[in-house]
């Protein structure tokens, strides 16, 4: 799920540090080791990114430790990564992948078809968005270096889904996955991939450590790296990810040289780094915060209640409360970002940013709301901006006589309650980054938290995925967004806001399009 930041959050890319920069990680003693220290804006719950949609987890291991058949470059175009080539049948029902040969996992095993089949089918089983595309089809082995999937209904977007879904389609050894019970997470000693770095250590509440993979075999041409794919080189011997817990500690650590990159820069301390040539500040409005309703049970399972909450929300107030500066956010109703080449839509915008208490009261009455009912908003305590947003909505609801509670929980408890105890909450606040097609949005999944099981939404998404004619697909999406903004209301979008981070200026290659993509970060002199 996506993570954001209170005000200005960080999309940062790694930086490099030669040993001596900071002697971290407890047992680290090699004074000549090249070390990169990154401060995250929270702690991931796990690094099994095929099962988890946490952006923080992906920032640590996706592209660095774990790789996929396809990836997105800096222009959001699909390129091959662990696949050497892919042949697609004319009707888009059969995808045949030729695998790169000689690719080694961190445990020394060669990556082959059995590993890809085990990984991809586990991913399909965990990602309902993918099931919308492929139905009951699953990957099968053709030979040691060829895999294939045959679908009943074709889709031209499977490679986009593999490359761009937040639940990452990473390839891991079958020898690991075959010992993992279906639906359960890979243990820490199973974080084994093919990337230029390998998982080394997780010190609870302190850091995650990666080490250089000396046996990594790059693909592509040296110097040709863009977005999340291309020729990778591990410039550091060790990479540490820290989760200090609050913005003030992070800012102080950057100033003292404890951290080379910080993925959370608080608005209160933003000015400390502006105009200082020792640091590079970067960020873009690439986070879309929203209220995701619990549509499986409770008061929000009633679409009229969802429309009532939508009606009362003043998105300008919500966004300003979380940022404190109108320059840091944009207001618009689209489920897709403005820079999306095809999918941006304003359908149903008349229902966005209503701030209409009288209409909200009428809709609550229509829904049969009583004085005993409570609307409960779930938020993570370490995401201050989400807490502030929730408090604004709480006051807006209380102002019209609706009992609203904000449940503020730590990261681990929040994840457990959100995913396993839907009876305890009615909505939660999170944010999402840009996607190259609507089907990649997790909040429209019928199996992800929020449980968007609306029959029309799922049928229309399936139709979009199967549509060869882009113009037809765009019209389908435009009509669907209008329906969602007007009738179904699976979520309430607030707008987009800036995520800002800071990186030492003597490190380059740490971010792409203002987003944290650190794997090829390196010292300027390298």
Image (spheres, rainbow, N blue to C red):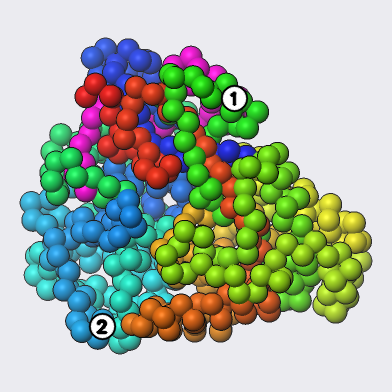
Query: Residue drawn at (23%, 45%), measured in percent from left and top?
Result: 225
Identify residue for label 1.
271
**Secondary structure category for the residue under label 1:** helix
Vertical order, 213 against 137 (above or below): above
For residue 135, say whether it is visible.
no
The stretch of residues the image draws in magenta is 230-257
Q: Quadrant of residue 382?
A: top right
Along the viewing direction, whichever of 160 and 482 lies nearer the viewer: 482
**Depth-wise, is mark 2 or mark 1 nearer the camera?**
1
The image shows a total of numbered marks equal to: 2
> On residue 93, which mark appears?
2
Query: Residue drawn at (84%, 52%), measured in percent from left and top?
Result: 395
> On residue 416, which mark appears?
none
Vertical order, 57 against 454 (above or below): above
Q: Is residue 27 magenta?
A: no
Query: Residue drawn at (92%, 66%), measured in percent from left and top?
Result: 371
Tell me if mark 2 has few (under 14), some (14-19) or many (20+) residues whose alpha carbon lies within 10 angstroms of its own: some
**Secondary structure category for the residue under label 2:** loop
Query: Residue drawn at (28%, 18%), measured in percent from left and top?
Result: 18
Counting from the top left corner in percent of width and height, residue 240 is at 37, 29
Q: Separation of disc 2 and disc 1 at Cα?
A: 53 Å
Q: Is residue 235 magenta?
A: yes
Counting from the top left corner in percent of width and height, residue 213 is at 20, 36
Earlier-in-chain disc, 2 versus 1? 2
Residue 7 located left or right of residue 471 = right
For residue 449, say whether it is visible.
yes
Q: Quadrant of residue 526?
A: top left
Counting from the top left corner in percent of width and height, residue 148 is at 19, 74
């Amino acid at each position: 799920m996506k993570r954001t930041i209170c005000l200005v959050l960080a999309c940062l890319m790694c930086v490099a540090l030669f040993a001596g920069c900071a002697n971290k990680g407890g047992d680290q003693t090699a004074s000549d080791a090249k070390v990169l220290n990154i401060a995250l804006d929270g702690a991931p719950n796990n690094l099994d990114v095929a099962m988890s949609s946490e952006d923080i987890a992906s920032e640590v291991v996706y592209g660095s430790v774990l790789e996929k058949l396809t990836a997105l470059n800096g222009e959001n175009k699909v390129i091959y990564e662990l696949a050497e080539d892919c042949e697609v049948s004319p009707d888009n029902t059969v995808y045949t992948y030729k695998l790169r040969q000689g690719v080694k996992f961190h445990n020394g095993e060669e990556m082959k078809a059995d590993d890809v089949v085990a990984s991809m089918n586990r991913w399909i089983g965990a990602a309902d968005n993918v099931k919308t595309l492929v139905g009951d089809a699953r990957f099968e082995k053709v030979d040691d270096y060829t895999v294939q999937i045959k679908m009943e209904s074709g889709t031209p977007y499977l490679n986009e889904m593999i490359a761009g879904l937040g639940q990452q389609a990473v390839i891991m050894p079958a020898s690991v996955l075959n010992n993992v019970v279906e639906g359960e997470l890979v243990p820490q000693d199973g974080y084994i991939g093919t990337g230029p770095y390998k998982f080394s250590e997780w010190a609870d509440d302190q850091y995650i450590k990666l080490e250089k993979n000396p046996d990594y075999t790059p693909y592509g041409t040296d110097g040709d790296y863009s977005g999340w794919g291309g020729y990778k080189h591990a410039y550091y011997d060790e990479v540490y990810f820290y989760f200090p817990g609050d913005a003030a500690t992070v800012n102080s650590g950057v100033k003292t040289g404890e951290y080379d990159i910080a993925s959370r820069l608080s608005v209160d301390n933003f000015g400390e780094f502006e105009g200082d040539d020792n640091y590079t500040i970067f960020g873009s409005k690439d986070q879309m915060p929203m209220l995701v309703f619990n549509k499986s049970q409770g008061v929000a399972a009633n679409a009229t209640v969802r429309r009532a909450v939508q009606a009362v929300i003043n998105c300008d107030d919500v966004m300003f409360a979380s940022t404190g500066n109108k320059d840091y956010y944009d207001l618009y109703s689209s489920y897709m970002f403005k820079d999306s080449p095809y999918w941006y839509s304003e359908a149903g915008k008349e229902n966005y940013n209503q701030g209409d208490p009288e209409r909200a009261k009428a809709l609550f009455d229509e829904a049969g709301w009583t004085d005993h009912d409570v609307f409960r908003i779930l938020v993570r305590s370490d995401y201050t901006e989400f807490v502030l947003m929730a408090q604004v909505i709480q006051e807006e609801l209380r102002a019209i006589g609706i009992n609203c509670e904000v449940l503020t929980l730590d990261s681990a408890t929040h994840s457990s309650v959100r995913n396993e105890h839907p009876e305890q909450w009615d909505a939660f606040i999170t944010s999402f980054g840009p996607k190259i097609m609507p089907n990649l949005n997790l909040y429209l999944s019928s199996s992800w938290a929020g449980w968007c099981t609306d029959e029309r939404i799922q049928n229309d998404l399936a139709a979009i995925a199967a549509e060869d004619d882009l113009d037809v697909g765009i019209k389908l999406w435009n009509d669907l967004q209008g329906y969602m903004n007007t009738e179904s209301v699976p979520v309430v979008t607030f707008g987009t806001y800036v995520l800002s981070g800071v990186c030492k200026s003597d490190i380059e290659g740490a971010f792409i399009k203002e987003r944290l993509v650190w794997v090829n970060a390196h010292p300027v002199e390298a």
